[in-house]
Amino acid sequence: MRYLFLKGGQIVKWLFFLFIYLLSSTLVSVAGEFPNQPDRMAQFLGIGLISSAISLGFIGWRYWVQLQANNPRNFGKYPVTWQKVSRLFLLFAAMLVLQYVWSLLITLGVLHFPANQQAVDVAANQMPFWNNLFAVAVAPFFEELIFRGIFLNYFFAKNTKWNNFFGILVSGLLFGLGHEPSFDSTLLMYSAMGWLLGLTYLRFRDIRFNTALHIMNNLLTVI
């Protein structure tokens, strides 16, 4: 009973972290709905950016508290080396291949254009600078903390082969569902990105690496 109560509380907390991220991103996006009302646009944008800063600071602090309480994998305790950086770029090359295959399948009509990407494109057209900045420099920090850092520490904390495998599998699927709620092949592509990011997190044991990979991927998409 105590275990179920603990896990139930962790689920509620994780969903709360996800909610405040979605709320902050929505407030920023809504600002673009008022192109002819600059004062209203500035109001929503300001509230969204302030909300994002507070939410990101809070989630980052909670992640740090988690690691202080329970960190069997020693996340954040390994030095950054040039060898690791070079490996990160190899993983980025793998992500480029994944993106190319994805684009090719969309062009051939095998996959549909993701609804999430359509929404991102619409928002970017309404308010190019701020929405692109959010997508590249803010969203990756939120998503890596929520879907990799906090999620794996809450629900897959043991440092075992199978626990790590299922942790990557489940977190990647949730990441995919967060971007494509329909159970189709597009969900599989988003999940594959989540699996690669999860693998990066557990391989380097440092959330900065998968966050950097996520930023590079989003920057590529924006470009």
Image (cartoon, rainbow, N blue to C red):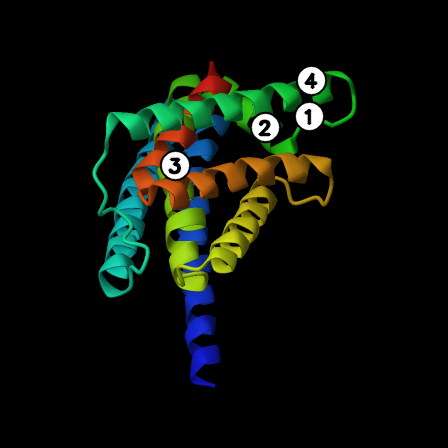
Residue, x 46% and y 58% (percent of image)?
Answer: 15
The residue labelled by disc 2 is: 117
Query: Of 205 and 65, which appears nearest the observer?
Result: 205
The Cα atoms of the two marked residues, 1 and 2, are separated by 7 Å
Crowding at mark 4 (Cα within 10 Å: few <14, some 14-19, many 20+)? few
**Residue 197 location in percent, x, y?**
46, 38
Crowding at mark 3 (Cα within 10 Å: few <14, some 14-19, many 20+)? many
The residue labelled by disc 4 is: 104
The Cα atoms of the two marked residues, 2 and 3, are separated by 21 Å
The residue labelled by disc 1 is: 113
Callouts 1 and 2 close, C-beta under 8 Å: yes
Amino acid type, label 3: Asn
The Cα atoms of the two marked residues, 3 and 4, are separated by 25 Å
Callouts 1 and 4 close, C-beta under 8 Å: no
Q: Outermost residue, bottom direction?
A: 1
Question: Is residue 14 at all visible to an observer of this figure?
Answer: yes
The residue labelled by disc 3 is: 210
Query: Of 61 and 90, which appears nearest the observer?
Result: 90
**Residue 178 location in percent, x, y?**
56, 45
Q: Is 184 placed left or right of 43 in the picture? A: right
Give the structural element (helix, strand or loop) at label 3.
helix
**Residue 170 location in percent, x, y?**
56, 53
Question: Is residue 37 at all visible to an observer of this figure?
Answer: no
Amino acid type, label 2: Gln
